[in-house]
Amino acid sequence: MLQTLYNVPEYNEELIDLAIAKMMEALSIEKDLHPDCKVVIKPNLVMAKSPSFPATTHPLVIKSVAKWLAAHGIKDITLAESSGGLYNGEYMKNVYRVCGMQQLAPLVKLNMDFSAKTVNCPAGFQNHSFHIITPICEADYIINICKLKTHAMTGYSGGIKNLFGVIPGLEKPQMHYRFPNLEDFSRMLVELAETVKPDITIIDAIDAMEGNGPTGGNSHPLYLLLGSKDVYTQDYFAAGLMGLDPKEIMMLKLAVEQGLALPDDISLSGDAIPENLTPFQVPDTKKLDFTGSLPRFLQKPFAKLAGRLLKSYPQLRKELCVGCGKCAESCPAHIIDIRDKKAHFKRKGCISCFCCQEMCPMKAIFVKKAL
């Protein structure tokens, strides 16, 4: 697997243009394209956040990719994403605006088709089908441009996790409710990635996020752009750059077991791995929840006890809560109510997916162990 890696010390358009050009040449992307190709760029726009905050794909990275495509004769370029809330014109227009996507015009069309299609999965998958946003279904070529982050539920967020954004709107919380177990949810993510099959995945790690990602963490710049045609092995590699153990990230563990991630077959191209990398802080959920450390043969008989004693739950900082309702909207178990302009949580029924923490714009939600 060819893994490209380029040092980019800041969000500077010329520097990013140069890195993207080298990346595309190294990966021979021009050979995969034709003039009538319908290209869809799938960024990470998890919520309406300024690009100065490392929660979303920076618009300059997308712009550089679009300029390269245009220079190589591609005219049909669409940016398509379903953020972590509603999937309609009013909601997505605000996400595009706040995340800086409007500067991509006229090179890139911002998707305004909010339909979705059912796509059947290969035989043997846990999932028989996925409901996927239409532009992804109709694309000839998919460019997956993610943001490198830690993640409260999955531990790591990169190329595989970014593809969860092809599930429309509030159907994503339904998927969390359907797969409350981390292993089942991670298997679903891997099967979704196998169904979408992005042609190239680019990781924006010029600035990345550590701690309570994917939206409530802090900046941890790596000053890197990574690119590969192999989303699984690249995620394994990127997790290692963060100081995480890829074998402890369930989606990556499953990808290795299924022969999708091939960490022993990585061939590096571009710049050298920086020598001064420091480990990323892990989310509070991973500091507090030790259920995954139980031996496999004990997990089943003690699952109920361990779940009660060791499970972590979302808690509210009332002084920060503004009663916007984003947490309640995103809760798959529907255990959050807004009363007197404050969120109120019920512990019973909580599946510890931490969608509420992810979608809170005020960082008013933190994580606490049950006992």
Image (cartoon, grey):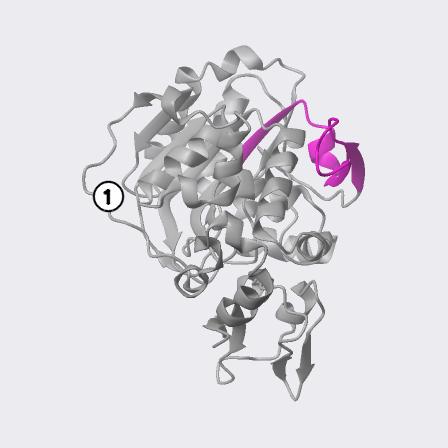
Q: Foreground: 139 or 230?
A: 230
In magenta, the rendered stretch is 116-144
Instruction: Tell me, yes or no, whether the highlighted magenta stretch contains residue 122.
Output: yes
Q: Foreground: 244 or 83?
A: 244
Q: Residue at x 40, y 40 (%)?
A: 246
Q: Secondary structure at mark 1?
A: loop
Residue 30 x, y percent position in the rendering: 51, 14
The residue to which callout 1 is attached is 277
Instruction: Tell me, yes or no, whether the highlighted magenta stretch contains residue 355.
Output: no
Relative side of 251 to 184, left or right:
left
Q: Foreground: 149 or 175?
A: 175
User: Can the viewer see residue 159 in this picture?
Assistant: no
Numbered-mark total: 1
Residue 26 x, y percent position in the rendering: 39, 16
Residue 181 x, y percent position in the rendering: 61, 53
Q: Residue at x 54, y 23 (%)?
A: 70
User: Can the viewer see residue 299 in this picture?
Assistant: yes
Relative side of 295 to 32, left or right:
left
Q: Amino acid at mark 1?
A: Leu
